[in-house]
Image (cartoon, rainbow, N blue to C red):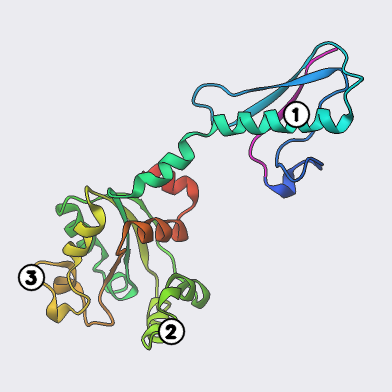
Amino acid sequence: MSNEVSRHPYASPSDDGGNTNGGQPGIVSPIPPNSTATSIAGPGSTRGECVTEGTQPMAHVSEATRTATFVRRCRAALGRARPRSTSQAHDMAGNHTLTIIKPDALTTGKAGKIIAHLEQQGFKIRASRVMHMNESQAGEFYAVHRERPFFSPLVTFMTSGPCMPMILEKENAVAALRTAIGATDPAQAEPGTVRKLYAESKERNAIHASDSDENAEREARFFFAETDVLAAV
């Protein structure tokens, strides 16, 4: 009997080819009656591949058992095929952070100066985009402050114009960036910091910076696709 191959490109559940294996995406064919399943994944591969190889007849094994064996071995192959995802996801800790050049700075032509300032401080830009957040997006991003009195004005300000989120890289990035941008109120910021140089007020303070490694990772994934985050780290 000729070999049958089922490929697993991490399809979404809606693209699963009508599988009936309990929702495992990408697996589209059960094990043939006279075959066993062998799972393989090439070195460094980001995809798993399940190959059915003709062997001795297995008529005495139920269809459910054959299918379960097939699914189990395919899942094992998929697990071996993507060992980098988990480790890379945690590589942001310590070396990367998220910043946003806010609408007040972007619309007044200060973005270039702020970027140059950060690069002079040793930060490297690993991902960036320009976007105009709507109320729902800004509200979700600042959801932690939802019960604070400044929440509504903050959402209004952040939706007043385009902003520029960026993933930055530097050793001890979170703390280094917080130092580089200065206090929330530019009147209290240290000389030479971003806010002292470019912020207008406590409310229109030019730039956002993540306050922890955990929030840096969460915020990066808010603005950037998984592929962008993994490429950045």
Q: Are marks 1 and 3 in contact (CB under 8 Å)?
A: no
Relative image position of residue 159 (x, y in whole percent) = 43, 77
Quarter of the figure that contains the N terminus: top right
Residue at horizontal 92%, vertical 19%? 59
Residue bearing the label numbered 3: 191
Q: CA distance from mark 2 to mark 3?
A: 33 Å
Residue 30 in view in this figure: no
The answer to whether 233 appears left or right of 80 in the picture is left
Tell me where residue 184 appears, x and y as whole percent: 22, 76
Q: Is residue 93 above or below residue 202?
A: above
Q: Secondary structure at mark 2?
A: loop
For disc 2, the neighbor class at 10 Å (few under 14, some 14 to 19, many from 20) is few
The residue nearer to you, when weighing 175 against 160, is 175
Residues 179 and 119: in front is 179
Amino acid bearing label 3: Pro
Q: Nearer the viewer, mark 1 or mark 3?
A: 1
Q: Secondary structure at mark 3?
A: loop
Q: Position of residue 8 (x, y in %)?
A: 67, 33
In the image, the segment drawn in magenta is: 1-11
Query: Considering only vertical position in the picture, is 12 above or below 1?
Result: below
Which residue occupies the foreground of this view, 80 or 64? 64
Residue position for label 1: 70
Tell me the amino acid under the disc marked 2.
Glu
Pick whichever, 232 or 213, lies toward us. 213
Residue in the image at 13% along x and 81% along y: 187
Q: Name the mark nearer the viewer: 2 or 3.
A: 2
Question: Which residue in the rendered view is the most extreme toward the left?
Answer: 191
Q: Which residue is mark 2?
A: 147
Q: Amino acid at mark 1?
A: Phe
Q: Is residue 180 above or below residue 136?
A: above
Alpha carbon of mark 2 to alpha carbon of mark 1: how far? 50 Å
